[in-house]
Amino acid sequence: YLRSLFQKESEFNKENIVFKAELTQLLKDINLSKKEFANLSNISYNTVNNWNDENRPIPPWIKSWLENYIEAKKFDKIKEVFDREGIK
């Protein structure tokens, strides 16, 4: 059972690997600086800035966090339109 559990976790982590160049591009695409990301995710800026692909890998949860952030921003824009148009 434990072997199966660890194997599933390992597969999850492989699917959610984010490399430094990918993170940098993602943040740029969504107009979010590393400092803003650090503040929003409650991580120190130094930690975010020191992530790399070798000895300080980016945690696997970062990818899903960014995906959720992007979706939340889309809903914020929709809400703004509804509010502006008086739609309740």
Image (cartoon, rainbow, N blue to C red):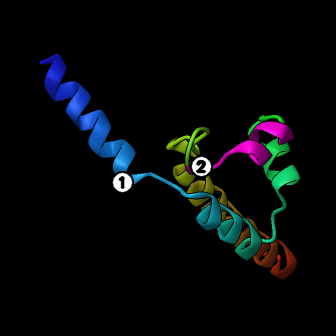
**Taken as a whole, is the magenta stretch helix, strand or loop?**
helix
The magenta stretch spans residue 84: no
The answer to which of marks 2 and 1 sits earlier in the sequence is 1
Mark drawn on residue 29: none
Distance, label 2 to label 1, CA atoms, is 14 Å
Residue 29 is left or right of residue 67, and the answer is right
Magenta part of the chain:
45-53
Residue 23 placement (x, y as % from top left): 64, 61
Quadrant the C terminus occupies: bottom right
Mark drawn on residue 15: 1
Of badges 2 and 1, nearer the viewer stands: 1
Crowding around mark 2 (Cα neighbors within 10 Å: few <14, some 14 to 19, many 20+) is: few
Residue 32 vertical position relative to residue 1 in the rendered view, above or below: below
Mark drawn on residue 65: 2
The picture quadrant where one finds residue 83 is bottom right
Residue 77 is left or right of residue 13, and the answer is right
What residue type is disc 2 on? Trp
Crowding around mark 1 (Cα neighbors within 10 Å: few <14, some 14 to 19, many 20+) is: few
The extreme bottom residue here reads 85
Residue 4 placement (x, y as % from top left): 14, 28
Residue 3 placement (x, y as % from top left): 15, 23
Residue 74 seen: no
What residue type is disc 1 on? Glu
The magenta stretch spans residue 52: yes
Q: Secondary structure at mark 2?
A: helix
